[in-house]
Amino acid sequence: MNPRKQHVTTEEGVQLFVQKLGQGPQTVLIPNGFYLSDALQSIANCCTLIFYDPRNRGRSNPISDQSKLKKGIHHDVEDIEALRRHFTIDKVNLIGHSYMGVTVALYAMKHPGHTGRIVQIGSMAPYPAKAYPVHLTNVDRTLAEVMAKIAQLQQERQSHDAKQFCRKFWSILCEIYVANPADAPKLNWDPCDLTNEINFPKQWTEHVLPSLQNLNLTPQDFAKAQAPVLAIHGRKDRSSPYGAGRDWALSLPNARLVTLDEAAHVPWIEYPDQFRSVLETFLSGGWPVTSEKVDSLDNPPS
């Protein structure tokens, strides 16, 4: 199945790289296509998938005007709406992974009338500064070892060119994204041929992360998102704590949680068949049988 590729120019003049895959009745918009297109193409039989790379990321055009980056995640919300209008989608379905899980939820709050169904995969927490109890996190030996390796790599930074440093960084970091570090090569995750991705740490530090840290979501904000939301979260996620998935499902009015006990931050690696089935069921209009209506943040280990 060959994707149809193009660049879409928003009203702001930002050019986003887009590729469409599949011809299913449900249209799903998915940010970070530069790595998620491989992970999610298995659901192209049920849906029309529109993968795109966010502004100044992946294969989208680079941006030198900092005014078009300074709002961080809020620019990403605007770009979803721009793509929805471009493709004339009345109610857009969205899948967001990691910090983009926050983005798609913010879109549902800001544009409830144009939101279809929302999937959050390993989403960052709705309250960035919140500390979760030990059993809702996975601060383990692997995480400590990876952080130590990255700290050492930072000290050696001057001895590597930008692409070499990027490759070494990701080869180390990938180990925390899977429950078993030995599965890290299965990610096939190497963004370092993309100049935007080599440069992204600066954008993350200066714009995206502060925009996340400055969120101050209230019960009134959550109540605006009436769309069905499915949070999929690995209990062994080291990047976004499992408590974050429970928090979203507890806070949003029409949300449920699928817990994958032996998965970390990229659950399509540990549970490929169940992951695909859960997505197809939800995007086709149902709730997966394994989904939980969360009524308490606390959840003891399984």
Image (spheres, rainbow, N blue to C red):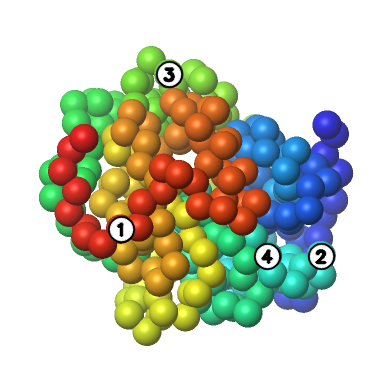
Name the residue carrying label 2: 87
Q: Which residue is mark 4?
A: 92
How far apart, in angstroms, are the residues tagged by discs 2 and 1?
A: 34 Å
Q: Which mark is residue 294?
A: 1
Q: Which residue is located at x 58 percent, y 61 percent?
A: 117
- Which marked residue is nearer to the observer: mark 2 or mark 1? 1
Camera sees residue 213: no
Residue at 49 percent across and 70 percent down: it is 106
Residue closest to the eye, 7 or 24: 24
Q: In the image, which is nearer the foreground, mark 4 or mark 1?
A: 1
Give me the C-alpha separation between circle 3 and circle 1: 30 Å
Q: Are marks 4 and 2 in contact (CB under 8 Å)?
A: no
CA gap, disc 4 to disc 3?
Answer: 33 Å
| Residue at the (15%, 43%) spot, across then down | 300
Spatial distance from mark 4 to mark 2, Cα to Cα? 10 Å
Residue placed most toward the observer, 226 or 145:
226
